[in-house]
Amino acid sequence: MNEIKLDLHLSGKTAAIFVDKQDRIVDWIGPFLKDNKIHLPIEQLEILTGNDHLISVYQSFEDADLKNGDAIFIYTVPQAEDTGRNSFSNESIDAPEGPGITKNEIPDSEEPSPGSWVNAEPTQDQSQEQPIGRTTIPASSKRPGKQIVTFIALLAAMTGGIVYYITTDSEGDEKPWEGYVMPSLAGAHDDNTKERPLTAPSENTNVPTHAATSSKRVQAMMTLEECLSQIANPEISYNSKKRFKNMALEYFLSQDVPVRKMIGSQITDDGSIISDYIESLSITCKQISIIKKTYTAGKIAEIYIAEQ
Amino acid sequence: MKIKIASITFLSAFFAIYVGHCYAQTSNSKAKIELTQEQIVAFKQQAITSAADLSRHMATMVDKSNEIAMRNKAVDLAIKLFSSETNVVEISSLNTTVKQQIKIRQYFNRIKALPYSSIQITWYDIHLSKDLTLGADGKYYGVVSILQKFDGIGNNEIGSYEDITAKNITIVIEVALVFNGPDKKERWILKLGDIRVQETLVSK
């Protein structure tokens, strides 16, 4: 039984959904408390202490039956402004509010539960004292969602699952992660062919080493190439490809970005635009490789591909 | 007053002639653009790829086990491979000598809705049967030939149907205004044209 106990400091912004290869939600974690599209029940969350919104989640990941390649979708909203204030301080700016819970329902305990983590500036020593099998995410983050993201990264490292981060704006529309971990997407503007495994943020030195050094690769966000590979995967259903299509389109300046075909050193054109090409790829399931991309305003304005 | 009207008429006529001249120049300049030999070689390959794409879209749209959204999308994507929605597909049957011509969207919708419980359309032996040549209108034309195997498995009422048809697909390479980064620019693009039946063969 691969059961671990996690003490998470959640500020109420983030939720993760575990999805199997058939696109079925097999499990979820975290409250979905803001203006997101999906509102998840939170009855299963065990709230141990309130002032700093510490929520302890006992999760058996065997129940979730995650397998290598399953997807973990993390939904969160970017923090409006980094005020330098700790998101997990007593100021309760992000106190959980939403279906099934209000601020008043949070127990007003001043004492953390045994083993929980309330120190806003944890030290290296503290992390080293963590008992085996118990992962505590430090509360050093000034950004929202960092702990849950780190937690999911650890989880993914242990399960071999793939992590996708999705942020939403205040309207609930999905958008790329902004100014946060998102290593692959952040690198997309200069070279998104590089694989950048998710690592804990540099200031966060307390990530337990057994997970951080896991040999299993953890991805923060699919690269364009990975998205296209999933879109062209004949084993994935057409409906399930929708999220990959949306993710891939985020890399482009618009849906009308032209697709140039490279045959040898020659460019041929059939007038395809990227939105149609991605759709076509999901049906024809062709293997392609990206030869070249040109950028405008940090987004792809033209793409050259070779079909195999 | 008469002088004023005459002046306006003269100026209008001059303007019309001037615009016509410019347009003719543009048209002529388009016609003068020719593909290089390397481009022709690449477009030949692209022609076969596009025909193969059409084949895949057709296989998707007729496969009743596919989701309907996917089948509908396959119709739209197939149509986008063509030069125009007015392009036609010639259809034939072993049961009649008459060849019918119907517009591509109508054709795709028709094969999608055929009452067989299961349909399979397979294209094979896709090859360029007529080289790309420059037409008088400045476009390049070629022909891709295919063999189409149709398998319709029906019930007791409609029975099953199976044939193999040799078809020719016109390939058109034309100059079109397409996106080039954020702007639009004239480029050569390859599109499919009309599809004609060459011969319908008895299967097996």
Image (tube, coloured by chain):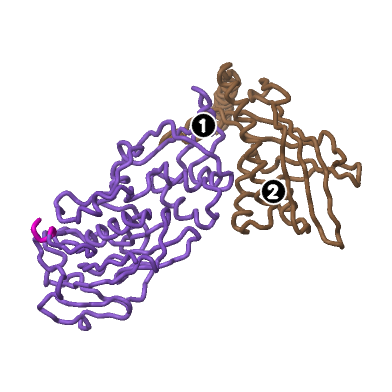
Chain colours: A purple, B brown
Q: Quick check: A81 above or below B25?
A: below
The residue under the point 74% across, 52% down is B119
Circle 1 — which element? strand
**Residue wearing tag 2:** B105
Check disc 2 and give the amino acid type. Arg
Q: For the magenta stretch, what is the residue range?
A: A123-128
Count residues near mark 2 (Cα–Cα under 10 Å), then give few for <14, some for 14-19, many for 20+: some
**Which chain hosts label 2?**
B
Q: Position of residue B104 (x, y in %)?
A: 71, 45
Residue A270 image-quadrant placement? top right
Q: Is residue A282 a member of the stretch shown in magenta? A: no
Amino acid type, mark 1: Lys
Q: Which quarter of the rendering shows the C terminus of chain A? A: top right
**Which residue occupies 35% across, 65% down?**
A61
Residue A24 numbered mark, or none:
none
Instruction: Give the residue drawn at x 79%, y 55%.
Output: B153
> In the rendering, which numbered label is found on residue A261?
1
